[in-house]
Amino acid sequence: MCIYLIPQHGLCNRLSWLCGFYAHNKNTTCPNYPCTVYVKWTPNNECNGHFLEIFETPPNVKFVRDASEVPLGIKKYAGQYSVPMVFKRYYAESISHSQECEAFGILQFRNKIEQFAEDFMKKHFSENTIGFHVRRTDHVGLAKSNGNYTSDAFFFRLMKNEINKDPKVKFFLAADNRNTQESFLKRFPNRTIIIKKIEKLNNSLRHTTLFDTGLDMCLLTHCKRVEGTFHSSFSRVALMMNIFRRNEFDKADAELKKQVFRGHKYAPSAPIQKKPNGPQKKKEQPRPTAKKISDTKASSADKETL
């Protein structure tokens, strides 16, 4: 059936909303052929650009300025949800993570973005480049209040673990602010790859243009895999698109679960311990130590002098 969508909030909240309805809609019958998805995409402070700056128009999608361009009787949906939540809330249906990956297959980057990515990868990437998306700015307060903050130290441990496994590994960093870039470049100067140093935009919630965000997203899809920020819609979408490009849908469950449950108690340095059966003796409390090492400060062993 034809539908009218008004995606809201940030870029990847909007992309998830669009792809969720589109994925469900393509399997429905419609008296009008072809069935059309009308989309009103209005840039604002949370999403500072239009879909078409980054992506090609998907088949049977028509972007409109307002409701006057939409035929009467077409049902309207305005909001933001992940693809699984769109299926659950509006259609009382479930969708697997592999199907979620397929839903993002409608997103095709514009030629100028794909060409930039191809040229950039020839100069800087190898077959074992791992993508990191580190979300900060307006995400930090919410993440910390929910106990879901993914610290720099957490990412540094991941990077160190990868270096121990593969001394030639490098990391493509997609960040949303200059301070994060500087932190990673200082810690791993010869392994961290960025497109360019970020200069904050004036009078904008976002520090980067939507076009530059699209470049980051495109390059993340070409990485060996993606390590993202817990509870970030951008990390989730980048991961889905990366799996789609790799055509490894069987890995979607494990990789998305890793993203969804990411948090300090699930970090590699603090694995979940199973409780043994039977009564347990009360553990003796350790004496307080003279020093306390903060989780946000990395020790000298974490530095790139491996």
Image: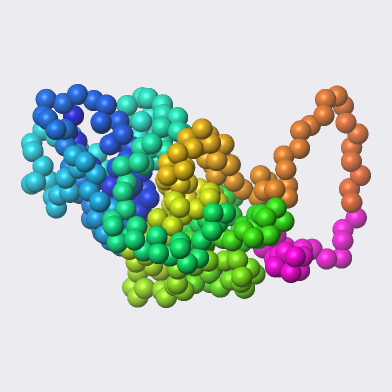
Res. 161 in view:
no
Residue 294 belongs to magenta span: yes
Q: Name the quadrant of the N terminus.
A: top left
**Residue drawn at (39%, 40%), measured in percent from left and top?**
82
Residue 247 falls left or right of residue 76: right
Dominant secondary structure of the residues highlighted in magenta in the image: loop
**Residue drawn at (50%, 48%), measured in percent from left and top?**
231
Res. 21 in view:
yes
Residue 73 belongs to magenta span: no
- Give the x, y percent position of residue 75: 18, 34
- Give the x, y percent position of residue 264: 65, 50
Indicate the quadrant where residue 92 lies.
Answer: top left
Q: Tell me, what colour scheme is on the image?
A: rainbow
Residue nearer the viewer, 288 or 148: 148
Residue 36 falls left or right of residue 9: left
Residue nearer the viewer, 185 or 207: 185
Whether residue 37 is situated above or below residue 123 in the rendered picture: above
Indicate the quadrant where residue 94 lies.
Answer: top left
Whether residue 214 is situated above or below residue 77 in the rendered picture: below
Whether residue 73 is situated above or below residue 244 in the rendered picture: above
Magenta stretch: give its range: 287-306
- Give the x, y percent position of residue 223: 50, 53
Q: Name the quadrant of the C terminus.
A: bottom right
**Residue drawn at (46%, 63%), measured in percent from left and top?**
122
Residue nearer the viewer, 157 or 202: 157
**Residue drawn at (36%, 42%), measured in percent from left and top?**
104
- Give the x, y percent position of residue 149: 58, 54
| Number of callouts | 0
